[in-house]
Image: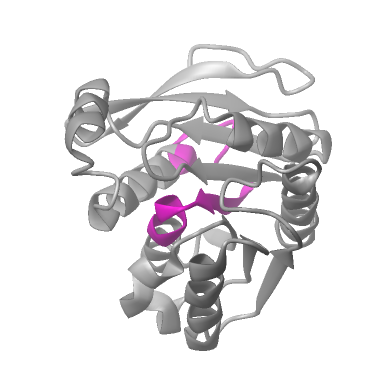
């Protein structure tokens, strides 16, 4: 890693090599951090998602490092915008998350930090699949408006603490998460944010998500 990270966890651009592709990311490590959260964005989104960035800022204020990463290359993103062909490719997204996890393990600044995944929408399914692939490395998962149903086959194999957060007005996704909760065999919790829709755009809704995520990760990563 060429860039020195600021004492207060200032974001620095990084490039993550995974097989034959190189993905762009933003890494920040506050002083004294003992845990790091790897973000898995949702359908049609990227590391610039304002919702994930708000959550990441709250996590850093809680003393956690963050890595926001594009799970698709620029060319793949262009294809996905036209066809939506890749945003539901959970296998591909999970493979990229596993690769990013291994990249964190190989870096001196991050290899000793306890790791958690924060997944949104389809990214939550990818996070659950990747967590099963790296059970010794990943310590906790938080899902925001997630689609854990898309990881249905692996849900009974998830062994780490999993928090599912859903908006109170996101009715189809509530039922998907309730069903997934029953299939999880790990420590688990479903929190429904009253009045919130899928993107948590209502006043204070995303703040609730960030607080819940920070509490969960602080508990299990530090």
Name the image quarter holding the C terminus: bottom right
Residue 142 shown left or right of residue 212 in the figure: left
Q: Residue at x 65, y 47 (%)?
A: 200
Q: Position of residue 86 (x, y in %)?
A: 22, 44
Q: Residue at x 38, y 47 (%)?
A: 97
Which residue is nearer to you in this view: 35 or 88? 88
Q: How is the image coloured?
A: one colour
Q: Residue at x 47, y 74 (%)?
A: 176
Q: Residue at x 28, y 52 (%)?
A: 88
- Residue 116 covered by magenta stretch: yes
Q: Position of residue 93 (x, y in %)?
A: 31, 48
Residue 70 shown left or right of residue 189 in the figure: left
Quarter location, residue 193: bottom right
Residue 151 shown left or right of residue 29 in the figure: left
Position above or below: 101 against 186: above
- Segment tinted magenta in the rendering: 104-126
- Residue 62 covered by magenta stretch: no
Q: Is residue 210 visible?
A: yes
């Amino acid at each position: 890693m060429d860039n020195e990270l600021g004492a207060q966890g200032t974001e620095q651009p990084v490039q993550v090599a995974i097989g034959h592709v190189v993905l762009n990311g933003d890494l920040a490590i506050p002083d004294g951090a003992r845990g790091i959260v790897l973000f898995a964005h949702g359908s049609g989104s990227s590391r610039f998602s304002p919702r994930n960035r708000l959550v990441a800022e709250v996590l850093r204020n809680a003393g956690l490092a963050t890595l926001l990463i594009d799970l698709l290359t620029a060319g793949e993103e262009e294809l996905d915008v036209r066809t939506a062909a890749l945003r539901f490719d959970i296998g591909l997204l999970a493979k990229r998350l596993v690769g990013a996890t291994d990249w964190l393990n190989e870096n001196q600044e991050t290899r000793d930090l306890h790791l958690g995944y924060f997944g949104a929408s389809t990214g939550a399914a990818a996070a659950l699949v990747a967590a099963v692939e790296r059970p010794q490395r990943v310590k906790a998962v938080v899902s925001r408006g997630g689609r854990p149903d898309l990881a249905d086959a692996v849900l009974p194999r998830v062994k780490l603490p999993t928090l599912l957060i859903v908006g109170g007005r996101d009715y189809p996704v509530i039922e998907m998460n309730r069903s997934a909760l029953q299939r999880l065999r790990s420590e688990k919790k479903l929190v429904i944010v009253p009045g919130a829709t899928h993107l948590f755009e209502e006043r204070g809704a995303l703040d609730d998500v960030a607080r819940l995520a920070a509490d969960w990760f602080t508990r299990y990563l530090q």
